[in-house]
Amino acid sequence: MPNVSVFDVGTFEVETGKKLVLALEDNGINILHRCGGNAKCTTCRVEILAGDYLDVTNKEKNAFANNGIDDLLFDDCLRLSCQILVTKDITVRPIMTVENTGKEVGPRPAD
């Protein structure tokens, strides 16, 4: 099973193919997902620090563009955690959490 490492938090094992947003949430990371994992709000974005997960989908590109942050997409290695299926080790830094925004998490994304 692959490992998910979260900057300044720790590492945990997840089942192969699990959505990263759910892996984070299920392991105590209060990452936002205001749109319920539908790649619309970009609140579940993470910075990829290590791992081969830099191929951004068209759905993600549109979400970033629609939210006015597409200029950060490639320079900062940003991805939407609701669009990443964990298939190998990955290290991330969550960008928006309950703790750093004071916002509610949002509806749980579908598996």
Image: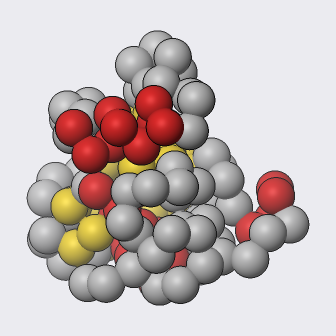
Q: Residue 99: x and y, percent?
A: 81, 65
Q: Residue furthest right?
A: 102
The number of numbered badges drawn on the structure is 0
Which of the 4 image quadrants contains residue 87? Answer: bottom left
| Corner quadrant of residue 67 | top right
Quick check: can you spot residue 45? yes
Residue 77, above or below 11: above
The scheme the figure's colours follow is secondary structure
Does residue 4 show up? no
Taking the image as shown, residue 86 lies to the left or right of residue 95, namely: left
Residue at image x 58%, y 29%?
A: 68
The location of residue 55, given as percent across then percent down, is 20, 32
Q: Quadrant of residue 40 in the image?
A: bottom left
Q: Quadrant of the N terminus?
A: bottom left
Q: Nearer the viewer, residue 71 or 23?
A: 71
Residue shown at the point (82%, 58%) measured from the top left: 101
Q: Position of residue 50 (x, y in %)?
A: 35, 34
Q: Nearer the viewer, residue 78 or 23?
A: 78
On screen, residue 83 above or below 32: above
Quadrant containing the C terminus in the rendered view: bottom left
Position of residue 35 measured from the top left corner of the image (x, y, whole percent)? 51, 69
Q: Residue sitting at 65 percent across and 76 percent down?
A: 105
